[in-house]
Image: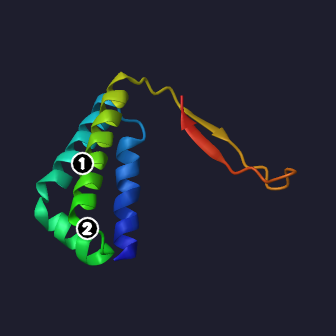
Amino acid sequence: MIKQTVTQAKKAYELFINSTGEVRSQLLIQIAHEIEALGDLLIETAMQESNLPQARLQGERGRTCGQLRMFADVAKQYKYTGLSIDTAQPDRAPAPKATSEKCK
């Protein structure tokens, strides 16, 4: 199961790494739609697994879908020109620095 999931994630990465902002926007909108389409089943399952109240989980679902749509709008406007990688400095003082990556 884990190997299959990793393989699928790698395929998705390869499909979307060089995709346009419009394609990424459509994906984010579709994810929000699919979350909402789960309806009460998502909330009921999350309540059983987390012991959080229904109202809290409904709010979290709404916030998540709202953020996905907001990022979809950003993705449409953004022009991807490449990846910038700031490499780690594990020996840096006073604290180590982690690798960070960003699209430019």
Does the residue at mark 1 contact the one at mark 2 (Cβ under 8 Å)?
no
Q: Nearer the viewer, residue 90 or 42?
A: 42
Question: Is label 1 or label 2 in front?
Answer: 2
Q: Nearer the viewer, residue 73 or 78?
A: 73
Q: Where 51 sits versus 13, above or below?
A: below
Disc count in the image?
2
User: x, y percentage for residue 69?
Assistant: 27, 37
Q: Nearer the viewer, residue 60 or 23?
A: 60
Q: Where 66 sits versus 88, above or below?
A: above
User: Which quadrant: the N terminus?
Assistant: bottom left
Query: Of the residues shown, which amino acid type is indicated by label 1?
Result: Gly
Q: Quadrant of residue 51?
A: bottom left
Residue 100's tag is none
Residue under circle 1? 62
- Residue drawn at (25%, 69%) of the image: 46
Residue under circle 2? 53
Name the side, left or right, on which 17 lies relative to 39. Answer: right
User: x, y percentage for residue 93?
Assistant: 87, 51
User: x, y percentage for residue 44?
Assistant: 17, 70
Residue at mark 1 to residue at mark 2: CA–CA distance: 15 Å
Mark 1 residue element? helix
- Residue drawn at (38%, 64%) of the image: 7
